[in-house]
Image (cartoon, rainbow, N blue to C red):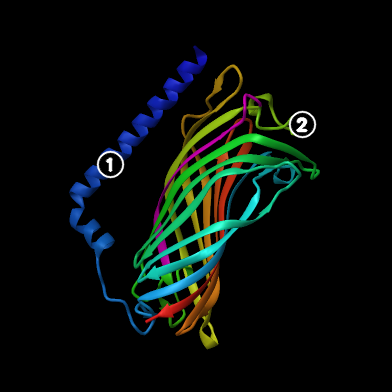
């Protein structure tokens, strides 16, 4: 009965929250329709002195990529954290791009485990839409099979732990006429001169971590944690705002370095579940979020190459000052040939 009541409270709170957001969105759109339309769908011409938008209509590509979703738990001190790592998997393959659209397909060629007998299964999809003023990352990650690493670097196999993460990060690029997000990440455009742009946006994330009727924290690593932190299942829903800045430094001989930092503020609703009860903290909590997208590469007339790295850091407050941090991460290397 306690579990049922807590779940009802959570659902009720979530329903009211999303209804509130929906009502606010309708009111804002109704009152500011022309303003929003001008901001989101304006189509100013790109400054050709800064961006070569037609660098290549078609290109062929080879690539290698690694995508992970680690998470961490700690109480007060980051140095006392317990880290949870999936297997590191590297996939490679071929792809093709058409204007701003790139499709890459490959297979896993290298797997690195933390300890013997670790087996991580599932799906890691982190896609991107970078079109003029719109910057969006879409994540769908389902992983089962982790290794828990304690503060003393001792390791415990937890192939029963399952993580589900679905999220969308959207940012609006204000200086899109002179700054291209496509150039350092997809490669079909070319940033001809150094430039930067402020950006702001919204995000949403649904995150779940669970074990097979056992607590997520292994017995060997429970010192320093309160008994309320010994949950076997946790569900979190987060949404909020972000604002930051991106800059690309164009170097001689068509090389470039790009970096961005986008901090945010998250509003969280969630619960942790133990063997006998649902522990529901504050119905709504606030926490920081940080997104960083970075790239280095070469943007030639015939060949292009890039190495990109993105990291999405999400912080969730648990009970008794404990924290859970999860970090979707992507590293990708692309070598492309432009077909005019």
Is residue 209 magenta-colored? yes
Q: 211 above or below 122?
A: above
As drawn, the label of residue 223 is 2
Q: 147 above or below 1?
A: below
Q: Measuring from the top left, give residue 122's x and y in whole percent.
A: 55, 43
Disc 1 to disc 2, how far (Cα)?
A: 45 Å
Please name the residue shown 48% across and 20% down the image. 6
Please name the residue shown 49% across and 81% down the image. 303
Q: Which residues are magenta?
A: 198-214
Q: For mark 2, give the secondary structure.
A: loop
Pick whichever of labels 1 and 2 is earlier in the sequence.
Answer: 1
Q: Nearer the viewer, residue 281 or 296?
A: 296
Q: 309 above or below 83?
A: below
On the rendered image, what quadrant is the C terminus found in? bottom left
Q: Measuring from the top left, give residue 264's x and y in whole percent.
A: 48, 52
310 vs 240, left or right, is right
Q: Measuring from the top left, give residue 317's x and y in whole percent.
A: 57, 37
Is residue 236 magenta-colored? no
- The crowd level at tag 2 (other Cα within 10 Å; few <14, some 14-19, many 20+) is few
**Residue 181 visible in the current orientation:** no
Between marks 1 and 2 in the image, the one whose residue lies nearer the viewer: 2
281 vs 53, left or right, is right
On the image, numbered disc 1 is attached to which residue? 24
Q: Nearer the viewer, residue 75 or 108?
A: 108
């Amino acid at each position: 009965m306690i579990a049922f009541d807590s779940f009802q409270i959570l659902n009720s709170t979530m329903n009211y929250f999303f209804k509130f957001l929906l009502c606010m969105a309708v009111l804002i759109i109704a009152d500011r329709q022309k303003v929003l339309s001008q901001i989101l769908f304006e189509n100013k011409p790109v400054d050709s002195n800064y961006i070569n938008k037609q660098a290549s209509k078609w290109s062929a590509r080879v690539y290698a990529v690694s995508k992970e979703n680690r998470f961490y738990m700690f109480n007060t001190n980051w140095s006392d954290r317990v880290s949870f790592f999936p297997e590191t998997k590297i996939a490679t393959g071929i792809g093709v791009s058409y204007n701003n659209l790139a499709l890459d397909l490959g297979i896993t060629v290298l797997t690195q485990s933390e300890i013997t007998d670790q087996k991580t299964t599932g799906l890691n999809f982190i896609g991107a839409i970078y079109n003029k003023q719109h910057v969006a990352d879409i994540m769908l990650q389902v992983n089962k099979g982790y290794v828990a690493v304690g503060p003393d670097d001792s390791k415990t196999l937890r192939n029963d732990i399952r993580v589900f993460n679905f999220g969308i990060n959207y940012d609006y690029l204000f200086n899109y006429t002179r700054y291209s997000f496509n150039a350092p990440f997809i490669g079909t455009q070319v940033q001809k001169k150094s430039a930067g742009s402020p950006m702001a946006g919204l995000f949403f994330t649904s995150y779940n971590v669970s074990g097979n009727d056992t607590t997520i924290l292994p017995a060997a690593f429970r010192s320093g944690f309160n008994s309320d932190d010994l949950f076997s299942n946790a569900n979190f829903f987060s949404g909020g705002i972000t604002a930051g800045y991106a800059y690309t430094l164009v170097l001689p001989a068509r090389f470039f370095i790009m970096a961005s930092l986008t901090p945010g503020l998250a509003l969280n609703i969630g619960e942790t579940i133990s063997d006998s009860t649902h522990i529901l903290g504050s119905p709504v909590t606030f926490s920081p979020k940080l997104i960083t997208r970075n790239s280095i590469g070469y943007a030639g007339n015939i060949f292009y190459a890039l190495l990109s790295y993105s990291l999405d850091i999400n912080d969730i407050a648990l009970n008794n000052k404990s924290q859970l941090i999860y970090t979707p991460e992507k590293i990708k290397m692309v070598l492309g040939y432009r077909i005019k």
